[in-house]
């Protein structure tokens, strides 16, 4: 069955017309899906019965199902979302007193192969549709009964390798759900053609670059895909993005003990960003443990602090990601793996 979620008001109007109804019904259907959180056509009470029946015969709303939920002591909720074809992806719900943020997946699995990432270990499955991306957010809104204000594309997958569906999801989140582009963040491993294309979209979202190393050699060791694009090229594309959109950038730096966490590397990182006159904070992310052949470990508290002090001494504003949801394996791809392991030994009855 075809999904309605992911379609714009205009497209929903076209659907109504193909069912012999006026186009303005599209507006009503969109309001039910995006504003009122309907998950079935039957819920759309103010649509004529005939339209509801015809819609339900050919379409579903198509929100992903919450197949599994892990609630952390800090109220972070990690979801395993089951898509219509049975594939699963992870989403995270992060409530703060003044806002609610969610982390969305853009692909089933990922092809980037990052050595430290649990998602990479499972390989690539497929791209998510626009409806599956937006649907994760709508499912969490419905489930928690709280309005989501911020979304980061930092779940499973590389958003810029699912370019068209991700772009359309930004448009649906802005125009249909009513979110501000300022509150949407695309996180990328550094896909240069994607960054260049995004610069021209007139969709000034926040761009976060997963940097993780101050030089090409170490970066390629951690992120095999990085061999395709030199840091120089990636940072130039980011600079252009910042200049065109007027938005600040975020540089994510995953800290792995004894690999990329020395003060000398912090200095090199600060100089690299300085040289390119790149605006933006560095966000330090201590490695969330994932078993790897390289035996990667979390950095020590002292190493994290020293790295941060050095970056700040070099004039770079540095934040540290609050490690939330630690008790629920909130690192990218971890829940899916644990649940998959559990399902192997404990088949669902
Ligand atoms: N492909 C995109 C978005 C998904 S990954 C990207 O690379 O940015 C989202 C973030 O989670 C990235 O910064 C990634 O490096 C980080 N991440 C992956 N594995 C991690 C781990 N084990 N611990 C902490 N952060 C991790």
Image (spheres, rainbow, N blue to C red):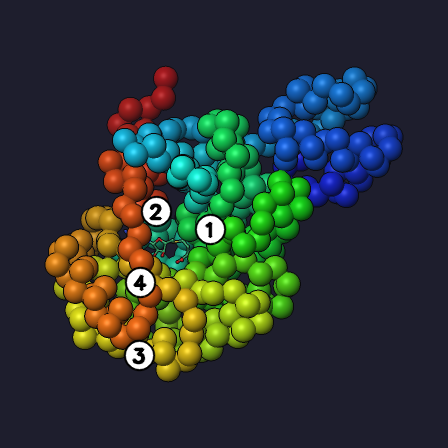
The front one of 68 and 85 is 68
Q: Residues within 10 Å of mark 1 (few under 14, many from 20)?
A: many
User: What is the crowding at mark 4: few (fewer than 14 residues within 10 Å), some, or many (at least 20)?
Assistant: many
Marks 1 and 3: which is nearer the front?
A: 3
Closer to the eye: label 3 or 4 = 4
The residue that label 2 is drawn on is 332
Figure check: 110 above or below 214: above
Determine whether the beta carbon of the residue marked 1 sits less than 8 angstroms from the nearest atom of ligand 1.
yes
For residue 153, the mark is: 1
Dot 3 or dot 4, earlier in sequence: 3
Residue 291's x, y, as percent? 20, 49
Instruction: Please name the residue that numbered disc 4 is placed on.
Output: 318
- Residue drawn where x is 57% and y is 53% of the image: 181
Q: Residue at x 45, y 34 (%)?
A: 81
Position of 149 with respect to 216 (left or right) is right
Residue position for label 3? 271
Q: Tell me which numbered mark, 1 or 3, is placed earlier along the sequence.
A: 1
């Amino acid at each position: 069955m075809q999904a309605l979620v992911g379609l714009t008001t205009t497209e929903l109007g076209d659907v109504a017309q193909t069912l012999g109804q006026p186009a303005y019904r599209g507006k009503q259907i969109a309001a039910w899906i995006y504003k009122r959180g309907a998950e079935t056509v039957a819920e759309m009470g103010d649509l004529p019965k005939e339209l509801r029946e015809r819609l339900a015969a050919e379409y579903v709303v198509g929100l992903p199902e919450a197949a599994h939920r892990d609630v952390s002591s800090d109220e972070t909720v990690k979801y395993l979302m089951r898509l219509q074809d049975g594939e699963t992806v992870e989403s995270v719900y992060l409530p703060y007193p003044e806002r609610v943020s969610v982390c969305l997946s853009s692909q089933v699995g990922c092809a980037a192969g990052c050595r430290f990432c649990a998602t990479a270990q499972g390989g690539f499955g497929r791209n998510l549709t626009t409806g599956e991306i937006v649907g994760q957010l709508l499912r969490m809104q419905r489930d928690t009964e709280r309005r989501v204000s911020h979304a980061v594309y930092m779940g499973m997958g590389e958003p810029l390798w699912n370019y068209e569906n991700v772009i359309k999801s930004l448009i649906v989140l802005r125009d249909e759900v009513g979110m501000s582009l300022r509150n949407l963040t695309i996180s990328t491993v550094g896909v240069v053609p994607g960054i260049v294309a995004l610069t021209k979209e007139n969709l000034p979202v926040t761009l976060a670059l997963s940097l993780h190393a101050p030089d090409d050699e170490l970066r390629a060791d951690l992120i095999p895909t990085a061999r395709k694009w030199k840091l120089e090229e990636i940072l130039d594309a980011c600079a252009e993005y910042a200049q065109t959109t007027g938005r600040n950038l975020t540089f994510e730096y995953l800290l792995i003990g004894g690999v990329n966490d020395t003060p000398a590397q912090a200095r090199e990182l600060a100089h690299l960003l300085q040289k390119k006159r790149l605006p933006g904070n560095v966000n330090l992310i201590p490695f969330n443990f994932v078993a790897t052949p390289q035996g990667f470990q979390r950095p020590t508290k002292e190493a994290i602090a020293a790295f941060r002090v050095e970056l700040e001494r070099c004039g770079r504003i540095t934040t540290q990601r609050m490690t939330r949801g630690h008790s629920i394996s909130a690192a990218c791809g971890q829940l899916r793996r644990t649940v998959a392991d559990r399902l192997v030994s404990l088949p669902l009855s």
